[in-house]
Image: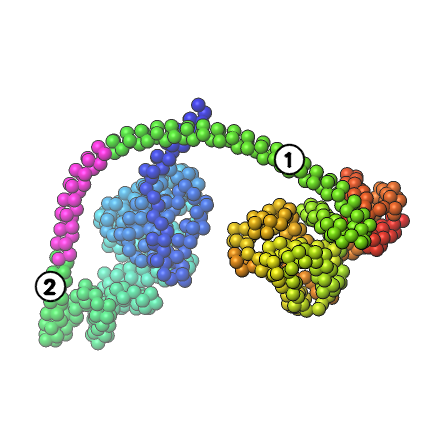
Amino acid sequence: MKYTLIILLLSTSWLLAQERPPLPGMESIRPLASDPDDTTGFYKLAHAIEANHDKYPTHLEAYYYYHLGQYYSMHEINLRKAVDNLMLTLAYLPNLPDSLKYLEFKTLRSLGIHYGALSKFDSAAWAYEQALNFINSVNTEKYNSKQAMLYIQLSDLAIQGFGNLELSLEYLDRASKFRDISSDTSEIDYHLASGYGRYHFNKANYDLAKSYFLECLKLAELRNPRERRNIKNFSYSFLASINFEVDNYREALKYDLLSLEIEKEENNPANLIASYSNLGEDYLLIGQPDSALYYYSLGLDLAEKIESAERKIEVLGNLHEFYAQQNDMSRAYSTLKERSELLDTLIRHKTQVRYNELLRKYEAEKQEKVLKEQQDQIELLQAQEEAAQLRLMLFITVIVIGLVIAFFIFRSRIKSREMKAKQLEEMSQFKDAVTGMVAHDLKNPLSVILKKQDNDETVKYMAGKMLTLVQNMLDIRKFEQAQLIPDTEAHSLDKIIQDAEDQVRPLLAEKNINIKANLNPCMVNADKELISRVFINLFTNAIKYSPLNGRILITTEKHSDQITVSITDQGKGISKENLNVIFEPYKQVSPLASGNIASTGLGLTFCKLALEAHHSQIRVESSPGKGTTFTFDLQLAGTNTRETAAEVVDQSMALTAKEKSYVAEILPQLQTLKFHNALLLDNIMDEVEKRDLNNLKPIITALSNAAFSDNRQHYDQLLEELKQLSL
């Protein structure tokens, strides 16, 4: 029942998630950010979104659309797209946590500003009122300054959008009250002064208006350079207008010239043309027609340069009046004619635009009617789809319950298989233990037989063959348990190969096979016993798979610090699938391929592990019908840096009192040890590990290797070192 409930909840969540509209991919708008150095562009905003992705995991949509709206406002100056994205922001706001509630206020305030710029004054008023409602709902003092600014923006809207001066004054008075309880008033003070200044200018209270705009000029010094320029330009324009209204044209000219200097820095063509027109009118009124014509001409040139028909019409109107006042009727007529033609063209263009807009609205209304009919059909389909989803959810629930039951059944089978695997592992360990015990029991008697049979070559050969097999079994086990350390010394590679060839000579004679050697005489760093057996195993392997009267080729190639040895036979080769298994224990190819010669499958395994202990890798190249080549590398004498068993002993730590006591106990047995009873060393190693006598492990391992390889000289040397360590 518990699992069923969880599955139902998960299924319901999944179905609900399918109804949520996907967030548009960042990649779809990334090409807009073509200039990474533009700090006001979308590049910065897009990266801000990505950087805060972890912070806003469930509300990225609102954050995303808000910043995209800001991008269109600041970078592309596309106010309609800015408004569209800000409205999308509002759609995702209701579920925002308290930590992100400020985004709702910022979105509403931005909407008010953008709607005002688009002359959608009712929408602007709605956005500002909603922003005020938000502030009242959170009721925190940190919004006092923001509330003051909202009332100032509503005051501007009351004048510009609705022409309601009294409402504008009411908003300014409210803003003033919130200014008095705000902590930071620097921005509010300027906007209040400019708001009161505009109110009194529209009420024709020019002295009061002038005093407010002069106050704005003082407050401008407290702002940053860019804000300072904007405040001064705004104030200069109103001061010029105030002086113009009271017929003080020279004072108006002074402020218009100051405004012109700022407009030149801003490099806004439309504002520059307006400044040129104002200066032309000022100079004309103070009796300087040449200067007036100069500024009118600058305005006309700039209007033509930016290809603005509306600005050119305004300037041509000013020039027409100028020429008429100067009694230059010819130029007055030509400018009037040009203005009229341009005005007719502009009106036709606007008429066409208006017609296209009305046509678009008609098509939209027509489409809306069609959509309404489609919506009714969609609602019907949605009802059917909801029923289908419910059936799907029930079906999924049944399927999941079935999967859960199947999982428990499968898990019980897995447990059963794990138990069987454990039993197999225990059986494998038992097999390895028995194999090792039998090999130990066989090795020592075989060593005795070899030493006693000096005359009978057949017995000696068979005993040697059996001893090699036993040594392979023992050494493979030691290699796998990392207990066998090669005792490397400088040896003649030619001598090692010759000794190995002597060992397999009876086999060579049976099949009349010849070994051809192309060797580079050299000394190698190697454990002679192990490497000799590598060659014996590879020779034996090559003889088995070579035809009668065949040939085995041995080649060597010297390098800077290594020599590469290759052994090639003329056998039938090894198939590709068998190349992957020939080095595994007890694995071998079909007996028919070896001429029905029996094999344990341990020889190549021993070669691989022995060479790896010498930090080398055995490689094989073969294909059916083309023979087989085994290749490996050996370290040249004089370049070897690997540790021998003796060196390991020399670097051992000082023995503890407990370890010295144990050495004193076993030393008499080690000194009288017969090599045919070398199994004693394995028992000693087991006791060392049992008593945790870690410092004795390296030297006992080295002694065991020397005993198993019949190296009495090395064994005695190691025994003397152990005796010295125990003193």
Q: Position of residue 510 (x, y in %)?
A: 66, 56
For image coordinates 17% across by 42% down, the residue present is 368
Say whether residue 47 is left or right of residue 113: right
> In front here: 548 or 442?
548
Q: Secondary structure at mark 1?
A: helix
Q: Position of residue 167 (x, y in %)?
A: 26, 45
- Magenta span: predominant SS is helix
At label 1, which amino acid type do we have? Met
Residue bearing the label numbered 2: 344
Which mark's residue is nearer the viewer, 1 or 2? 1
Q: Position of residue 413 (x, y in %)?
A: 51, 30
At label 2, which amino acid type do we have? Asp
Say whether residue 380 is left or right of residue 620: left
Residue bearing the label numbered 1: 427
Q: Is residue 453 above or below residue 255?
A: above
> In front here: 628 or 16?
628
